Amino acid sequence: MSVAVHTSPLDVVGVDGFVHLDYAATAPCVRAAADAVNALLPYYGSVHRGTGLRSQTSTLEYERARDVVAGFLGARDGDHVVFTRNTTDALNLLARAVPAGTRTVVFESEHHATLLPWADPVRLPAPASADEAVAAASSALRVLRGPKLLAVTGASNVTGEILPIRRLAEAAHRHGARIVVDAAQLAPHVPISLADLDADYVALSGHKLYAPFGAGVLAGRSDWLDAAQPYLAGGGASAAVGAGDVRWATGPARHEGGTPNLLGAVALAAVCTALADAGRSTSDEQELLAHLRAGLRSIPGAVEVSLFGPRSPRVGIVSLALAGHDPARVADRLAVEHGVGVRAGQFCAHPLVRHLTGRAGVAACGDTPGLLRASFGLGTTTDHLDRFLSGLAACLTVPARRRPAARSTD
């Protein structure tokens, strides 16, 4: 295999000959991110901690990256942009920062990053429609007292369906609650704006947004973050340390203790700039999605699953229940026999996958109730999708060659 040569900032850095359709897990790096990292490496140094050329350059680039990400996310005056490791880290940070006694409302259909961090959450059943999601969240928030937070995904990492974030934000605010949006799957596909969505917080991962260098973001209202104890106690988060007391930093630095991930932040900002410069049209992706879904309808035994039905708006993610087949074995065959990488398992959304497989009427085949997921983005072509479709059809009709049993992934 030879490494492909690229020239555009949004060209995928990839390997020729293998089709990657697992963007929802980790998107490939694009040239803008790789170039930004390579350009900064000669100047790489400590951030906020030195006067030399390396430190000054690194500090400037780190804070410039924060400004770029703030603009990409439509941050308002006074919002903080805190760099984290990923979406899970960002949501755990917020869970640590909410006022004492805050009740969080969350759907069972969430990714574990959104489902699990909260103390004493109110868990709602997976909604069957966008209207039901808004009604259920509104009913739950109406009866709660004290600080309240609605935690919701922007787009499902299992079905790709887009939730009605603006309507959910209106419902939350009507009942005196705040809303945090897990935008890990939404941000790579459509524009995200805190101001336009009227969301209080948004969290995302660089590795889903074509910048797989270990950076994530929590962006949103500053008051809860400024009032909270630092997420990581240590250098950078501390402004002054005495014999028995500490004065903590204010602003984003309060929650960015230790040496920050400069290269991750700069790579993420470079992708944000490239995406903004290129425009955020979704028409090409929707054409690819329609092509994929049409092809799947002709493959017996492959049943697309969804929460809201086949006509609900969605991004480039499709999950399938496979009657009589273990999705992990099918995924293994797709990789080995057809050179196509997809994902099988429960996708860190176990309650949702159990719900969807039950609704699809497909019994578990293998160790766990799992699905097969194909997800795509920049660099994906109809040829890639056709290769997946033909490979899947073959896997569901042609017996596998004898190999060690595959295992379902999380």
Image (cartoon, rainbow, N blue to C red):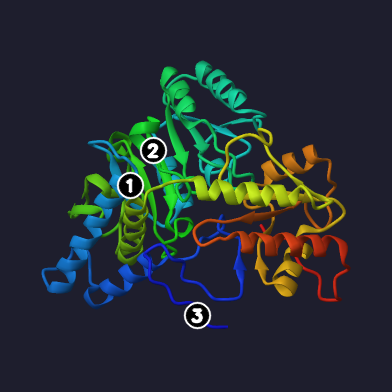
Residue under numbered circle 2: 201
Label 1 vs 3, first from the N-terminus: 3
- Residue 297 shown left or right of residue 119 in the figure: right
Q: Could you tell me which residue is drawn at 51 percent across and 72 percent down?
A: 14
Q: Rounded to the nearest whole Å, what is the CA distance between mark 3 and mark 2? A: 39 Å
Q: Where does the image place residue 369, in percent across and percent down from the top left?
A: 77, 50
Outermost residue, bottom side: 1
> Is there any visible trace of residue 305 in the rendered image?
yes
Label 3 vs 2, first from the N-terminus: 3
- Residue 35 shown left or right of residue 334 in the figure: left
Callout in the foreground (3, 2): 3
Q: Could you tell me which residue is drawn at 58 percent across and 37 percent down?
A: 313
**Amino acid type indicated by mark 3:** Val
Residue under numbered circle 3: 3
Q: Could you tell me which residue is drawn at 23 percent across and 53 percent down?
A: 238
Q: Rounded to the nearest whole Å, what is the CA distance between mark 1 and mark 3? A: 31 Å
Classify 10 Å Cα crowding around label 1: few (below 14), some (14-19), many (20 and above).
Answer: many
Secondary structure under the numbered disc 3 in the rendered image: loop
Q: Where does the image place residue 341, in percent across and percent down from the top left?
A: 65, 66
Relative height, residue 130 to residue 255 (above, below): above
- Residue 144 shown left or right of residue 382 in the figure: left
> Is there any visible trace of residue 185 in the rendered image?
no
Secondary structure under the numbered disc 2 in the rendered image: strand
- Residue 388 shown left or right of residue 41 in the figure: right
**Amino acid type indicated by mark 1:** Phe
Classify 10 Å Cα crowding around label 2: few (below 14), some (14-19), many (20 and above).
Answer: many
Relative height, residue 142 to residue 95 (above, below): above
Q: How many marks?
A: 3
Classify 10 Å Cα crowding around label 3: few (below 14), some (14-19), many (20 and above).
Answer: few
**Amino acid type indicated by mark 2:** Tyr
Callout in the foreground (1, 2): 1
Residue under numbered circle 1: 72
